[in-house]
Amino acid sequence: MQGLSAAGFALALLSAAAGAHAAGASIDAPLDGLRGDAVRGRAIVADRTRGLCLPCHTGPFPEVRFQGDLAPDLAGTGSRWSEGQLRLRIVDGRRLDPTSIMPAYHRSDGLERVAPAVRGRPILDAQQVEDVVAFLVTLRDAPSISSTAPQGTR
């Protein structure tokens, strides 16, 4: 620490922690100690009025037309991320990527441009977050060729 001020040392620690946080961050414990249900989670993800996932993501939902292509395909999420990593992405993905357009599904403080009717409330409650996590970890298969095709060809 010789030649490094206390403020400089603190800044170095914060910078190192930020890099480690973004590289392997997760919320390992289930929210409120709840267990998720994959069937309910699938229903939330596929429902455009509750989960709001499919306007941006595509995935293994043949019954849902007009899935998005702004965000990664949900197929294979269970192979790409751990349960804790998925939980963090759903709770507040901006902790990993501050420029993400994905909403914070289980955070209500510090948000901007929130409709008055939902201000102060998370999009998903703790049980719903756990249900979505339980479903996403079941998606182990990589995206198929047809799910990565441009929107007009599906």
Image: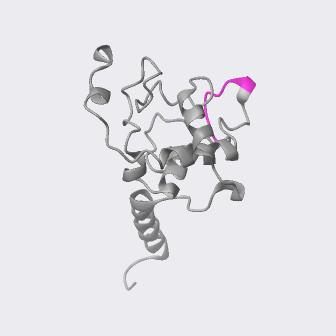
- Identify the image quadrant of residue 47: top right
Give left or right: position of 113 versus 96: right
Residue 67 part of the magenta-drawn span: no
Give left or right: position of 58 versus 36: left
Residue drawn at point x = 42 percent, y = 53 percent: 81
Query: In which quadrant will I find the C terminus?
Result: top left
Nearer the observer, 29 or 47 = 47
- Residue at the extreme bottom of the image, as rendered: 2
Count of all numbered marks drawn on residues in the image: 0
Nearer the observer, 114 or 66 = 66
Segment tinted magenta in the rendering: 109-117
Residue drawn at point x = 61 percent, y = 32 percent: 112
Residue 114 location (% of width, % of height): 65, 28
Residue 41 position (above or below residue 116): below
Q: How is the image coloured?
A: one colour
Magenta stretch: dominant SS?
A: loop
Query: In which quadrant will I find the N terminus?
Result: bottom left
Give left or right: position of 44 versus 32: left
Residue 111 location (% of width, % of height): 62, 37
Residue 115 part of the magenta-drawn span: yes
Residue 52 location (% of width, % of height): 55, 28
- Residue at the extreme top of the image, as rendered: 152
Residue 80 location (% of width, % of height): 37, 51
Residue drawn at point x = 29 percent, y = 29 percent: 148
Give left or right: position of 150 versus 13: left
Residue drawn at point x = 71 percent, y = 56 percent: 32
Nearer the observer, 109 or 124 = 124
Nearer the observer, 119 or 30 = 30
